[in-house]
Amino acid sequence: MPKINGNEIRPGNVLEHNGGLWAAVKVDHVKPGKGGAFAQVEMRNLRNGSKLNERFRSADKVERVRLEQKDQQFLYEDSGMLVLMDTDTYDQVQLSAELLGERRPFLQDGMMVVVEYHGDEPLNASLPQKVVCKVVETEPVVKGQTAANSFKPAVLDNGVKVSVPPFVGQDEDIVVNTETMEYVERA
């Protein structure tokens, strides 16, 4: 695996550090008035989700890990485990639903999921950035209420609560960003 200097760490990089696999979440380059520059890196453990703040000087060498990404199709959920099918080999694999975290409600039947593997171990799963959902509960549309930047609460068919513009009514399909969990546009 390639080693990189401490000042080359970027957000999203996966590093092997202290015997674990860590994803760099936030990187700040600090140049104090006295002493050498360093990178202040906030990292998240890919196996247990714990966080760590670490300083890396430019002379420090860090092991950078490349994860293999596979497109897999969601089939069904069985007692907290997601059953996915590899679209190349048609093998079925079971992953913990906890890999998706709070994005889990946006998972729909037949949806393609990108799973990142380190060897045979699944470490991360990501959904498509935009998903179409139906509004099941919101306040009725009020004519003339077109103030800019005004939003109203809405409940989606998957139980997630989002804020939508005043012109969006009940039983309408909308596009939701799965990363920020915010309204994007009408479907």
Image: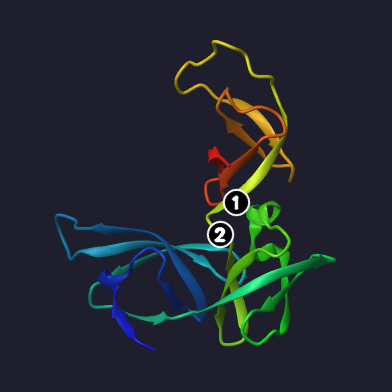
State whether residue 137 is above or below residue 54: above
User: Tag 2's secondary structure?
Assistant: loop
The residue that appears at 29% across and 73% down in the rendered structure is 6
32 vs 62, nearest the viewer: 62
Q: Exactly how many numbered labels are in the figure?
A: 2
Q: Residue 20: give x, y in percent of width and height.
A: 52, 78
The quadrant in which the N terminus is found is bottom left
- The residue where tag 1 is placed is 131
Disc sitting over residue 106 in the figure:
none
Type of amino acid at the residue the image marks with label 1: Val
The residue that appears at 58% across and 24% down in the rendered structure is 167
Q: Residue 30: give x, y in percent of width and height.
A: 24, 57
Dot 1, how many residues are within 10 Å of its Cα: few (below 14), some (14-19), or many (20+)? some
The residue that appears at 46% across and 23% down in the rendered structure is 149
Q: Residue 21: give x, y in percent of width and height.
A: 51, 76
The quadrant in which the C terminus is found is top right
User: Tag 1's secondary structure?
Assistant: strand
State whether residue 13 is above or below residue 160: below
Q: Quadrant of residue 81?
A: bottom right
For the view shown, which residue lies furthest in the right direction? 79
For the view shown, which residue lies furthest in the left direction? 33
- The residue where tag 2 is placed is 128
Judge left or right: residue 81 versus residue 62: right
Judge left or right: residue 146 versus residue 84: left
Dot 2, how many residues are within 10 Å of its Cα: few (below 14), some (14-19), or many (20+)? some
Report if the CB atoms under discs 2 and 1 are less than 8 Å apart. yes
Type of amino acid at the residue the image marks with label 2: Pro
The residue that appears at 58% across and 31% down in the rendered structure is 164
Q: Quadrant of residue 77?
A: bottom right
86 vs 6, nearest the viewer: 86
